[in-house]
Image (cartoon, helix red, strand yellow):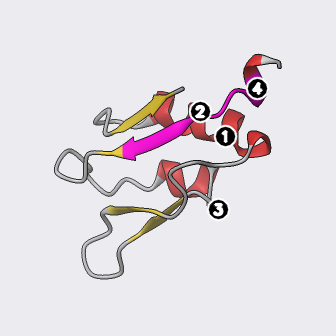
Amino acid sequence: MTEAEVPVHVSVDRQKCCGAGQCVLLAPDVFDQGEDDGIVVLLDPEPDPPQHGMVREAEAVCPTSAITITS
């Protein structure tokens, strides 16, 4: 099993989220924004391997480090 195939779990600290939306742009199947406040909504806490790269990029660019990925 390659690193890209290892199951991952995504979590989001909504209290840290500033609503910048980069995660939604990078991984729209995993993240969304609340309509009222723009705060991230996690759609898929255990994304499929094709999403892993996009989720890791979203974690890297999150301005408040609100996204955590564990495997």
Q: Which residue is mark 4?
A: 4
- Tell me the tag on residue 57: 2
| Residue drawn at (35%, 81%) of the image | 35
Residue 5 is one of the magenta-drawn residues: yes
Q: Give the crowd class for mark 2: few <14, some 14-19, many >=20 residues within 10 Å.
A: some
Q: Are marks 2 and 1 in contact (CB under 8 Å)?
A: yes
Viewport quadrant of the N terminus: top right
Q: Are marks 1 and 4 in contact (CB under 8 Å)?
A: no
SS assignment at label 1: helix
Q: Position of residue 63 (x, y in %)?
A: 34, 36
The span from disc 2 to disc 1 (Cα, nearest Å) is 5 Å
| Mark before the other along the chain sequence, 3 or 2 | 3
- 3 on left or right of 66: right
- Tell me the tag on residue 71: none
Q: Amino acid type of disc 3?
A: Asp
Q: Position of residue 38 (x, y in %)?
A: 32, 68
The span from disc 4 to disc 3 (Cα, nearest Å) is 17 Å
SS assignment at label 3: loop
- Tell me the tag on residue 54: 1
- Tell me the tag on residue 29: 3
Q: Amino acid type of disc 1?
A: Met
Q: Amino acid type of disc 2?
A: Glu
Mark nearer the viewer, 4 or 3? 4
Q: Amino acid type of disc 4?
A: Ala
Q: Give the crowd class for mark 1: few <14, some 14-19, many >=20 residues within 10 Å.
A: some
Part of the protein shown in magenta: 4-11
- 37 on left or right of 68: left
| Mark before the other along the chain sequence, 3 or 1 | 3
